[in-house]
C-alpha cells in the first residue's frame, strides 16, 4: 500500500499538482488537493484498471478541487452576491443610459506567435487575479472547470439569473482589462 | 430594436444556456448592423479559448513540479494515518 503512494507521487505527483494549480491558482491549495487525492486514493483503492492510473487519480482530484472551490465560496459573505444581483446597474461603467457602449469593444486576436501568445495569456491571468473573489470563483467554475450552470447554481445556492449576471459581469470586466492591458505589436 | 446592453447580455448568456428562438433572431439582427457587439462576441469567444489554453499550458509545463517538501509531507501524513488505524 505504501509503495503505491510513492509510485503514484513519483509518476503522477507533478502532473496532479500542475492540474490542481491550473485551477486553484494557489500553491498551498494545490498541494493540499494532491494530498487529499492521495488519501482518498488509498482509502478507497477503487482503481478499476479500465483506465490509466493517472486518469483515475485525476478523476479523484477533480472532485477534491470542486470541494475546495465550494468551501472557498462558502467562506465569502453572501452579501457580495446580493450586490451583484441588484445590478443591471452594475453595468453603468460600460453602457450609457440608452444602452449604447461607452467605449466600443476593440478587436483583439490571440497572437499566433508562441512567445506573444504566452504574454497574452499571462496578461489574461493577471486580469483574472484582479476580479472580485466571488466573480473569480464563478468564472473559474464555469470557464476553467467547465461545470454547467445548473451545477454551479446548486454549488453556490444561487438562481440561474444570479449566475448569468455574475458571469456577464466577470466576462465584461475581463475583456475590458485585456483591451486595456494587451497592447498589440 | 435591441440595445447593445441587451445584446451583450444575451451574447454572454449564450455561453451558459441555449437562447430562445426569438432571442436568437433579435440578437442576429442586432449583430448584422452592430460592429461593436460583433467584436464583443469575438472577444468572449477568444476569452473562452484562452482560458483553455492557460490550463493546458500549465498542465504540460514540466518546469512546475510538486515541491519536495510537500511530497514528504504527504507521505508522512499518509503513514501516520495508517499507523493510527
Image: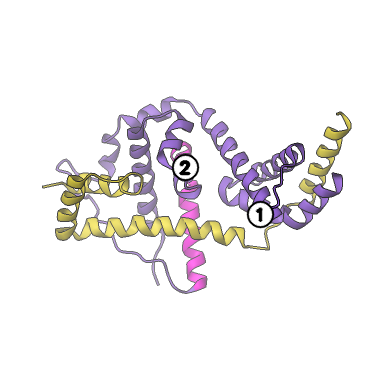
Chain colours: A purple, B yellow
| Badge 2: chain ID | A
**Left or right: A25, with A3 as reference point:** left
Indicate whether A169 appears above or below A6: above
Q: Secondary structure at mark 1?
A: loop
| Mark pair 2, 1: CA separation | 33 Å
Q: Chain of mark 1?
A: A
- Which label sits in the foreground, 2 or 1? 1
Residue extending farthest bottom: A113
Main SS of residues in magenta: helix
Say what secondary structure mark 2 lies in.
helix
Q: Residue at x 58, y 45 (%)?
A: A24
Q: Is residue B3 above or below residue A120?
A: above
Q: Is residue B85 left or right of residue A12?
A: right
- The disc placed on residue A136 is 2
* Residue under the image location 47 percent in, 74 percent down: A113
Measuring from the top left, give residue A92's x and y in whole percent: 25, 40
**Number of other residues with Cα within 10 Å of mark 1, as a class: few under 14, some 14 to 19, many 20 or more:** few
Residue drawn at (41%, 58%), measured in percent from left and top?
A181
Amino acid at each position: 500500500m505504501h509503495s503505491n503512494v510513492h509510485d503514484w507521487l513519483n509518476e503522477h505527483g507533478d502532473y496532479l499538482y500542475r492540474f490542481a494549480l491550473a485551477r486553484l491558482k494557489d500553491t498551498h491549495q494545490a498541494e493540499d488537493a494532491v494530498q487529499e487525492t492521495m488519501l482518498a486514493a488509498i482509502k478507497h483503492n477503487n482503481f478499476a484498471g479500465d483506465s490509466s492510473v493517472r486518469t483515475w487519480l485525476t478523476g479523484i482530484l477533480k472532485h477534491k478541487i470542486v470541494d475546495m472551490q465550494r468551501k472557498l465560496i462558502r467562506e465569502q459573505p453572501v452579501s457580495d452576491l446580493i450586490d451583484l444581483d441588484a445590478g443591471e446597474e452594475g453595468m453603468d461603467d460600460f453602457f450609457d443610459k440608452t444602452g449604447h457602449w461607452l467605449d466600443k469593444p476593440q478587436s483583439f486576436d490571440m497572437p499566433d506567435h508562441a512567445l506573444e501568445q504566452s504574454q497574452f495569456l499571462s496578461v489574461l491571468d493577471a486580469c483574472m487575479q484582479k476580479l472580485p473573489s466571488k466573480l473569480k470563483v464563478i468564472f473559474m467554475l464555469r470557464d476553467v472547470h467547465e461545470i454547467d450552470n445548473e451545477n454551479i447554481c446548486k454549488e453556490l445556492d444561487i438562481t440561474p439569473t444570479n449566475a448569468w449576471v455574475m458571469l456577464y459581469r466577470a466576462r465584461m470586466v475581463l475583456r475590458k482589462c485585456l483591451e486595456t492591458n494587451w497592447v498589440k505589436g | 430594436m435591441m440595445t447593445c446592453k441587451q445584446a451583450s447580455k444575451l451574447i454572454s448568456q449564450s455561453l451558459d444556456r441555449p437562447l430562445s428562438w426569438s432571442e436568437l433572431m433579435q440578437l442576429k439582427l442586432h449583430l448584422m448592423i452592430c460592429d461593436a457587439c460583433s467584436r464583443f462576441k469575438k472577444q468572449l469567444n477568444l476569452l473562452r479559448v484562452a482560458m483553455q489554453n492557460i490550463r493546458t499550458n500549465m498542465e504540460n509545463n514540466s518546469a512546475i513540479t510538486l515541491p519536495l517538501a510537500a511530497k514528504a509531507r504527504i507521505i508522512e501524513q499518509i503513514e501516520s494515518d495508517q499507523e493510527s488505524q
